[in-house]
Amino acid sequence: MTSESVGAIFLGWLLGVLSPLIVDRIRNRYQEDEIRDGVYSELRELRFTLLVAAYGFQSEFGKLDRSYYQWLIANLETCDINAESAKMLEVVKNIAAKDDSTFALLVGEMRAKPGVGLNVRKYRMPYFDSKVGSLGIFDERKIAAMLDVRAQLEMFNEIVDDARMYHRMTYELAGINHQQAVKSANSCYVDLASRAREIVNRA
């Protein structure tokens, strides 16, 4: 057997051994990229959703001033561009550009009527939760940031439970107890606005 034949046999054996490893490495790299894309996509979607929610709560129960609109516009401009985000950006820029008297009038018209509550909802991160075991593909700083967002979202959802409870109580109570339930529900809406804004800042 010539040295060339031996070399060819060895090369064939080596390729046979390495091929599965190479295929697995490529597959794992593809899966890691897919997980990264999925997690980041979900975070971007959550960020925009809570940006809209924060604005809704703030406009009806909190304080809207020009600094809030500056924050809103700055964050909208970094969101993924789609019909919904583009339309919202156009609307808030239009409001922010108004003179002081018109601005105050428009902001006042957004306020919730006394005693009116909101149908609040919870938000989830199902893809992130399903991939918790794969978070090792991210660096520690990013893992900590994502887990922080997840924890903030859980606190948001706990406030949703409180808001729903107080809103339900407004139908069950009368007199001073009814007024207290309305006040407590409104306080929850303000807290939801603040928590949603915090999540947007961290996501």
Image (cartoon, helix red, strand yellow):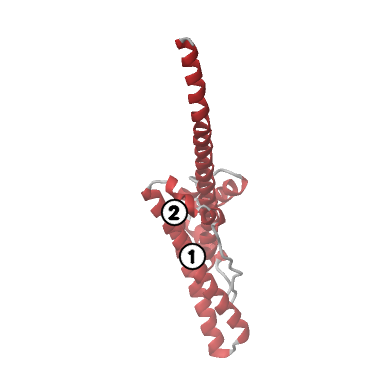
Is residue 48 among the parts visible in the rendering?
yes
Residue 141 shown left or right of residue 104 in the figure: left
Residue 99 shown left or right of residue 175 in the figure: left
Query: Front-most of 78 and 203?
Result: 203
Query: Front-most of 98 and 83?
Result: 83
Is residue 65 among the parts visible in the rendering?
no
Q: Is residue 147 above or below residue 173?
A: above
Q: Is residue 199 above or below residue 90?
A: below
Query: Front-most of 199 and 183?
Result: 199
Q: Secondary structure at mark 1?
A: helix
Mark 1 and mark 2 lie on one chain; the one further toward the N terminus is: 2
Residue type for callout 1: Glu
* Rendered residue at 58%/68% (across/down): 120
Query: Front-most of 35 and 167?
Result: 35
Q: Exactly how many numbered labels are in the figure?
A: 2
**Where does the image place residue 104, in percent across and percent down from the top left?**
50, 62
* Rendered residue at 58%/46% (across/down): 86
Residue at the spot of label 2: 146
Q: Residues within 10 Å of mark 1 (few under 14, many from 20)?
A: some
Residue type for callout 2: Met
Residue contact between numbered discs 1 and 2, judged by CB atoms under 8 Å? no
Q: Residue furthest left?
A: 141
**Where does the image place residue 60, in percent across and percent down from the top left?**
54, 67
Residue at the spot of label 1: 154
**Where does the image place residue 57, in percent across and percent down from the top left?**
53, 65
The image quadrant of residue 110 is bottom right
